[in-house]
Image (tube, helix red, strand yellow):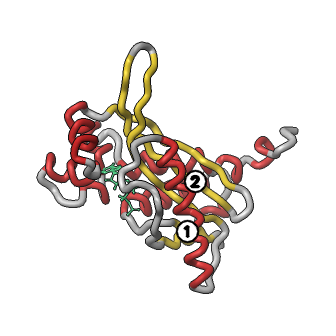
Amino acid sequence: MIKVALGSRRAAKIAAVRSCLARLAELDPHWRDAEVIPREVQTHIAAMPLDDAESMRGARERAHAVRARLQREGLTADFFLGLEGGFHMISGAGERLTLLRNWAYVTDGTRGSFGAGPAIPVPETIVTRVIETGRELGEIIDEITGEEDVRSNRGAWGVFSRGLLSRALSFELALIAAFAPFYNPTLYRSNGT
Ligand SMILES: O=P(O)(O)OP(=O)(O)OP(=O)(O)OC[C@H]1O[C@@H](n2cnc3c(O)ncnc32)[C@H](O)[C@@H]1O
């Protein structure tokens, strides 16, 4: 049975891993009964990443941290995953945009691969509140919706898109992208043949 370790215990992230594995099982039934091992891990990046580079570092650090944590527990897994979300500011086509985007990093302990999910524009008022107060997006979304812990469920994604997207779906897409070299190894072999 394939074992997949995740560097988080956040419900939306665990749900994303399970949905991703169900999609990978469409290509190869070996993925169907994969075991997910979620563990909380510490990272050294900002609590609220403000660019893709920081989110990528966070995703990779989480994957390496969960591997180290399992080793301390005398356990191992076939794959180690890190998921991280944050803002990314970009200028293009004469516009300046702040986007929310999620990143995934997958490693088997030897090779590693990044993937990203979709990017959704962040409402200007919310950008200003996060940047000016230095607080996490999750707290601000809870204040705006009057709900608790939105980040564990539909997330800012669900709020911005009126439920058409969810935080879990965005992480699922990032994971499917990150896993590509592992479920399509011939194409991604380093000699490219
Ligand atoms: O328990 P962990 O795995 O740490 O999960 P997290 O929800 O804190 O998630 P991240 O560290 O990956 O995300 C960084 C911050 O970005 C915020 N964030 C990102 N995406 C969000 C979303 O869809 N909804 C609410 N907050 C979000 C939230 O405040 C997070 O603390």
Classify 65 as above or below 52. Answer: below
Q: Check disc 1 and report its element: helix, strand or loop.
A: helix
Please name the residue shown 65% across and 50% down the image: 113
Comparing labels 2 and 1, the label whose residue is closer to the camera: 1
Please name the residue shown 37% across and 56% down the image: 47
Q: Which residue is mark 2?
A: 105
Q: Check disc 2 and report its element: helix, strand or loop.
A: strand
Classify 159 as above or below 64. Answer: above
Q: Nearer the viewer, residue 58 or 172?
A: 58
Q: Which residue is mark 1?
A: 65
| Residue 45: percent from left, percent from top | 45, 56
Mark 2: few/some/many CA within 10 Å (<14, 14-19, 20+) = many
Residue type (three-letter) at the residue carrying disc 2? Tyr
- The N terminus lies in which quarter of the figure? bottom right
Q: Nearer the viewer, residue 43 or 23?
A: 43
Mark 1: few/some/many CA within 10 Å (<14, 14-19, 20+) = many
Classify 64 as above or below 20. Answer: below
| Residue 148: percent from left, percent from top | 18, 60
Residue 112: which quarter of the image? bottom right
Residue type (three-letter) at the residue carrying disc 1? Ala
Mark 2 vs mark 1, CA separation in Å: 12 Å
In the image, is 163 to the left or to the right of 36? left
In the image, is 179 to the left or to the right of 188? left
| Residue 29: percent from left, percent from top | 65, 60
